[in-house]
């Protein structure tokens, strides 16, 4: 088995995480997993949604979008079609849920952090790149809240990141790019904290079902890959 | 640990699967997982969506809804709010994807089977009950296609079913009802074929992350539960 | 003239009214007019719509829907099309208006009763079955309000029910089923209180106009039919 | 009993019917029932909706709207709110259904006549004024089709018109204006052909139910009023 | 060069401005620029939009619509299509912006004036006719506010009006009708105050770009035409 | 008068135009006018919209969007609100219209070029930056069509660009940034071809009207600025 990119099965793509990519947001990150590039911003807003008001808890939520020509052929713009597609909704719910799992919402006070993940170039794995980049933007927003003395403690429970794994030509591989993703038998997205606990595991059979030992092999790959990604997040956060 | 329902950790709720529940659909099933009740219909339609036309393949798709007062407090009707909520979209995509994984679409010819899962009473696990009931309705629709000589071979790859598992008060338990679901630390939905291969695994941390050995214990519970559910599907299909 | 069902012109279909059909709603009724089956729930909610606030009056409103495969061929799901069709809107306005005419809203206090009528199987006369079943659900919700001491008096003005009448092959007939309905020259829906006063009369020519004496004959049939239906409502309410 | 307008119970408001009110439509009528003023246009279009294609039949349909400030206080514009309200939908369905009952659609050929009724000033009875004016616009559109030799026979079955009746302070009265309408116990809209056959009868109790003899009295008033309106339609059509 | 209408290049169409055209609005004007006819109403409402609350300022806003058959071929009704088209949105923003420029919003108090411009017959120049008519309706609404002692000073900064100019067959011409508009190389809409200051200038090349001297010639024509229109507004306001 | 940025009145911001910014589109440009940054892509698609089919003409159209946090405070995402705002619609119509004016659509053949302008960071002048960048992306798409031998001639009529001008503290200034824009008395956007002909001129009074000599001064500034921008476009196109 030869991966289209020439990578070994357990090899991530080139990862880059650029902070302060745009100037207005409290956290603004450009994350690249190879050719997949996502702008992740974190926007701090006073107050919380109605269902949380007066409960002394904060909120973290996420929205996801793709620029119409981030993909090989142009997709219709969701804003002009008048609704977000099912895939978009599914992904932004996943991002929001995962980030909330990394945060002690009580420690946020009655503040909301809105995460926006906008894909400017897609080559597979946009949701895992989004989560990985969004966590860094979230940390920057938390730092902002502390710097401004809006909160006094650190609501981050632990670092976390996300990666995809799959069975490509019978072999478990890490961090699928688009050519692999579209040919893979199984596609799994894993979100895991630094301590090794899982936040979300989503495995989907594409064409053939996957066996328990394949699941195990994929989780091993993902765990190692996520720890590597967390190192890269930390390196980015250590800069400037 | 005592389950609110008094069940043992590996015990399903009372399951019932009633075929021919309504009279118009090619497949019509009322499925109950305890107090959770879902009407699953399968509607046969000639032709396929535009993206499949002329490719000699069929299609299976699903929609999901909840009656406004299937729940403890009334939810707004999605038809009158003018859009399906994110949870609905996520669930109906899962149902459709899972059922397609159980079918050889080529053998369906250029026909579409539309699955509708409408929850009339909810008590946790509506998506897993929907999938389990929908598979039976799908088999009835396939039987209809064969009886009408529209197709000559059996497109069903294997029987499959779905169940939820979770960590409730530190203990892995099978088939969570609503009181367990709302208090559980982890919620996992598993869809598996009769041969033991996984079709979809979705585990989500709620409050605390879950460890690899918890994941393993949950998968063991789910695998056994799903084989039990498949027996019940077969018994229902053997009647009348 | 022979009715497709073999009924006499003044004969209702088999009517059944099952209370407590689902477990969450304050009133929950499964009503059957022959093969037409509708789930009618009544949900109590504190407060009233904005236009009534502070006026010391309650509110009763209704929504109507059909499961996509309640009919001979599958209809698109209104929630996924993003709007309710004109027929749905027309029917739910009729249901709400009729039920409000049966209730002294002042005696409800500032509470709202939301009626949901969801057709699970359709064979003509879904709106009249809905109203007839909804009244029973409404009474159960009123009983709930009294039992909970939220209100002290009975806001129900009188029992009421609804039935369709039409001219089928030149003969006025009661309670049309779908084969009659689709072939009838005139279709009339009548909603009447127990005291014999009309709440709503809607007669529509289909193909040919209808004369005054035909109108009279249809109203006679409807009045007798509605009194019969009210007996059945009372019998259902007398149980358990 | 004194009517607010000083009219006798069986007296119509001042009725005027102006043809060729705007210059582009095949039929364009300004109809006034007292201060209620509606622009009714009939637009001819080649072809029919999909469900009628190839069946050799034409189609007549209607849309209804109110200018935002046609009423005492400004209503939100439906186009900017993004949907037509329930009342609008109900009325335009009634207009379309009624006009189709006056036409032999087979004789229209595969042509569609779109009726637009736009209320520019409202003072009660906008739906009955709309139908009465629309019939005249429809006749002008039919004349256009004949003049252009698109059709050779007259598809109009008979003249028809519409008026409201009600019980105001216990007395049946004809053609309610807004002050009467908002205080009436019963509101009935009647659509009748020149031959005396009913096309649609819609009576609604407002506050109190209505008895059979009240219904009879209202129908008598309406029948006479509609014959008067048809005379006015004919007079307008006889001009120019 | 011969204009289709026979007018000279600097000649307006026949202009008429009828006040009190409908009876409910605080300002109601029918404005005609030749065959282009627009109903402009001004509706006074207590309060201002959320973003202005508590700032002691009023608001003026506008909506625009065309009756479906105001044009040569019927356009779909925006209310039933569920959204306003881009052209509509662009025009109503222009109308609102222009009128606000003519008013000292501080002097309006916390009141809103809603302008509705509804085209009942279109023959080119509907936006400029709308603005010209709307200003008169706005003045009537301001007079109403003063008469009712809701405001004590005059918030109108100066009279203003609007006209289109263009290059038709190489010649700058004033107030294009539809035949000219659809053949013109350049189309410019100018909104100007009585004192000669510009409020908005929008020139668009259609087919060929326009040179600086053409722009100058068009502005000269427009300035003269607008002063003429303001005379007509004043004459209308001087009546009754 | 001192500009907030320290620029002279006739000085552009730092302009940069980066081609091939993303990898999938036929033309992909990142354009910066100071801190305003827009991704402009041009996507080639076979075929034309319905209204042009069979007429031997191509089409150029544009859509515009802003990332939610491209601005100082986060704006709601249009895709999740379900509609594009009025400002968005107005801008994307302007972009499309301007680009079409620069192209001989006949020479495009029956092909469509979709322009997407997505603002990733906003600091005033996003529409003029969008047009200026989009023209470069459009040229790259045209080059693609020629390289692929889909078209044989060059449909570009001439280079064009766009810039804003305004009256800031009484002085006409070029290329307003956000601090100037929000304080300016007049805001004008000018789109001009290399030959000096105007494609679109849109001047809007903000607070005070603008006089003819101010208009002249602004046009002088804009004309010079646009010629400078066209030099920068050419330089970018000369690379690689």
Image: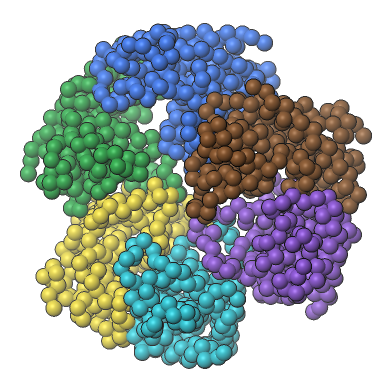
Chain colours: A blue, B green, C yellow, D cyan, E purple, F brown
Q: Position of residue A234 (x, y in %)?
A: 56, 9
Do we see residue F154 in this rendering? yes
Q: Position of residue D218 (x, y in %)?
A: 41, 85
Q: Is residue E189 above or below residue E123?
A: above
Q: Is residue A16 above or below residue E214?
A: above
Q: Position of residue F168 (x, y in %)?
A: 86, 39
Quadrant housing residue B134: top left
Q: Position of residue C132 (x, y in %)?
A: 28, 63
Q: Give the position of the C terminus of chain D as an image quadrant.
A: bottom right
Q: Residue C46 vs residue D35: left or right?
A: left
Q: Residue furthest front?
A: F152
Do we see residue B166 in this rendering? no
F221 or F152: nearer the viewer: F152
Quadrant housing residue C91: bottom left
Residue drawn at x 36%, y 47% is: B68
Instruction: Count the numbered circles shown.
Output: 0
Residue drawn at x 64%, y 44% is: F103
Q: Residue C184 vs residue A12: left or right?
A: left
F43 or B140: nearer the viewer: F43
Q: Residue A238 vs residue C223: left or right?
A: right
Q: Is residue A173 above or below residue E15?
A: above
Residue drawn at x 59%, y 33% is: F143
Residue drawn at x 41%, y 18% is: A176
């Amino acid at each position: 088995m030869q991966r289209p990119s020439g990578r070994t099965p357990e090899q991530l793509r080139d990862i880059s995480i650029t902070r302060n990519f745009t100037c207005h947001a409290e956290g603004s990150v450009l994350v690249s997993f190879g050719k997949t590039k996502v702008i992740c911003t974190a926007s701090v807003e006073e107050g919380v949604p109605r269902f949380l008001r007066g409960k002394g808890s904060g909120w973290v939520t996420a929205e996801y979008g793709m620029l119409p020509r981030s993909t090989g052929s142009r997709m219709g713009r969701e804003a002009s079609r008048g609704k977000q597609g099912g895939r978009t909704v599914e992904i932004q719910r996943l991002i929001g849920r995962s980030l909330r799992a990394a945060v002690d919402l009580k420690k946020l006070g009655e503040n909301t952090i809105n995460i926006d993940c906008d894909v400017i170039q897609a080559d597979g794995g946009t949701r895992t790149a989004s989560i990985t980049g969004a966590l860094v933007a979230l940390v920057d927003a938390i730092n902002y809240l502390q710097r401004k003395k809006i909160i006094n403690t650190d609501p981050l429970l632990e670092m976390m990141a996300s990666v995809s794994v799959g069975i490509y030509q019978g072999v478990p591989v890490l961090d699928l790019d688009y050519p692999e993703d579209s040919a893979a038998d199984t596609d799994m997205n894993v979100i895991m904290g630094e301590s090794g606990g899982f936040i979300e595991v989503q495995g989907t059979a594409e064409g053939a079902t996957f066996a328990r030992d394949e699941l195990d092999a994929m989780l091993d790959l993902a765990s190692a890959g996520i720890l590597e990604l967390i190192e890269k997040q930390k390196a980015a956060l250590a800069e400037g």
